[in-house]
Image (cartoon, helix red, strand yellow):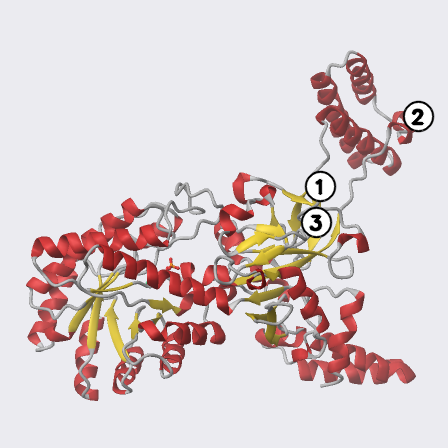
Amino acid sequence: AALYRVDSWGAPYFAVNDSGNIAVRPYGSITLAHQEIDLLKVIKKVSDLKSVGGLGSQFPLIVRFPDVLKTRLESLQSAFEFAIQSQGYESHYQGVYPVKCNQDRFVVEDIVKFGSPFRFGLEAGSKPELLLAMNCLCKGNPEALLVCNGFKDAEYISLALLARKLALNTVIVLEQEEEVKLVIDLTKKLSVRPVIGLRAKLRTKHSGHFGSTSGEKGKFGLTTNQILRVVKELHGSGMLDCLQLLHFHIGSQIPSTALLQDGVGEAAQIYSELVRLGANMKVIDIGGGLGIDYDGSKSGNSDLSVSYGLEEYASAVVNAIRVVCDRKSINHPIICSESGRAIVSHHSILIFEAMGAAAPTTPTMDQINIPTIMEGLSEDARADYWNLSDAAMRHDNETCLFYADQLKQRCVEQFKEGTLGIEQLGAIDGLFDLLTKMIGGSEPVRTYLVNLSIFTSIPDFWSIGQIFPIVPIHRLDERPAVKGVLSDLTCDSDGKIDKYIGGETSLPLHELDGDSGGGVNGRYYLGMFLGGAYQEALGGVHNLFGGPSVVTVLQSDGPQSFAVTRAMPGSSCGDVLRAMQHEPELMYNTLKHRAEEFCGFDAAVLSSSLAHSFHNMPYLELASSCSLIAMNNSGF
Ligand code: PLP
């Protein structure tokens, strides 16, 4: 377990249990043994659910834990409540969840339900996000905020005004100066009094990858002069009382509380100035940025790590606002935050299988056939060989490797010219591998093929180099014998994970040794953790590998301590083809007619096999799971 630093990045939600499996602690700690869920048992159970949703054991698989979501939400709320109480702050915290982090219906519905007792709301950044937020908040607390961010046209603003008419506590946050005119016009047309916020472009700059949204040159928000003009415009239209919220966002993964306090302090000054200018200010919305310590180092010195926890974050925010407001003698505002990453990252785990490992093929000394090697070598190459042998006798490893490398290169050149046979080239490769292994002393890093598309399921790794903890979910009581890198199914050289937490370029892995593995049918399962935010919506269909299957797991009192409450198969080949405008039904008919034309008696069997191919997921299927989907879906 120490090899994978599970306790550092995983506590208090993930640990390794006595069976050497990853255990999930949905409530963030355990008081009773049954409050711990063995992840491998979940996988076994899911593999038995042959008929649920036609799922079978279809990987990759996202396992969602709504209980973890609830715990995260409640922990964030308590952190702010504690800071507010202990600092004598005279208003309350009322957060919103930015749905962009994970728009999955059940995730958003759960957040609204779990957050209802403390008026937790939603943030939307586009029209479809607003539609889903409006729908979900109909079942939420009536005071919960619905914060409308993002670039807006008349339709977006009309929709937000409609939301207000539907008695949803909606705030239209102006991101661009032009939006104010649209809001004023549409308000008159639709005769509804809006609540308006504005997004300030702060001078405070966060220097990490996610900080490009911040600073004077940041993409979003109003500059000081634009804020002044918007205030004037609202005042001129008799709507300055509608301006009630100040929003800013210095970027995701804010590395330290020092930077946070700097930004929040600057925003609190703007807030107090808006009060002075006559706006009816009530809420300060500090945006997202509450970070995740992906590598567990707590160092705060890269996009991978933050140096604070929920309590320190909340305390820094409350303090920064309180100090400014007290100095200016203005009322303490309601504090809103738009934490997404911090709420949803822990709640889901991506499980995928290692299908095979490219085994090392280094020959032994006996297997190296020197006469074969010497056949056809050029004079120069022969000289390299003898120099290499001399160096080996003298135990001069450096010289030995130098000549081995030179010999190999000369042989490759000879092969390209057509003066060396493929057997000789193979023998030279073998000699080179053997020498590097003997001198270097280490086993070469192996490549494990995983049944996954990085582009679909871990898009941030490919696009921005984001590193997530990846760990085998079982056999953690067994020392891994191999170092490996994970290579996905796509025909793309970027489809490879060769960076891991702790700055490692390979991952300790176990041998894939069939049934002795203790998994399910001897399979080897890996989990990608802390990926509940952003990955699902950002993933594409490169190579037409679609979305993974999803199951939801709830804590229960039964003997297994959990229940699988929902199972959805991932996208089928038909689904991903449809996403690219192909028409699977027509494609099937064309191919079926062709089978009837060319294959006579076999046509029916071939057509049914074709239908299965359209219905199955694009990922590789191991023998036992292959037939499950096929049995459930015969023909279109
Ligand atoms: N609010 C806004 C305006 C954002 O742009 C973002 C994401 O970048 C968030 C909230 C969520 O940020 P985080 O995931 O860091 O909490």
Amino acid type, label 3: Tyr
Secondary structure under badge 3? strand
Report, in whole angstroms, how far the alpha carbon at label 3 lies from the one at label 1.
10 Å
Q: Which sits in the foreground, 311 or 611?
A: 311
Q: Which sits in the foreground, 407 or 104?
A: 104
Q: Disc 3 designates what residue?
A: 448
Q: Are marks 3 and 1 in contact (CB under 8 Å)?
A: no
Amino acid type, label 2: Pro
Secondary structure under badge 2? helix
Secondary structure under badge 1? strand
User: At 86% from the left edge and 38% from the top edge, which residue is drawn?
Assistant: 422
Query: Which of labels 2 and 3 is toward the front?
Result: 3
Q: Disc 1 designates what residue?
A: 482
Q: Residue furthest front?
A: 32
Which comes before the other along the chain, label 3 or label 1?
3
Which comes before the other along the chain, label 2 or label 1?
2
> Is 238 displayed left or right of 454 in the figure?
left
**369 to 109, vertically: above or below:** above
Report, in whole angstroms, how far the alpha carbon at label 2 lies from the one at label 1.
34 Å
Give x and y (percent) for residue 348.
Answer: 53, 63
Give x and y (percent) for residue 47.
Answer: 71, 69
Report, in whole angstroms, how far the alpha carbon at label 2 lies from the one at label 3.
35 Å
Query: Which of labels 3 and 1 is toward the front?
Result: 1
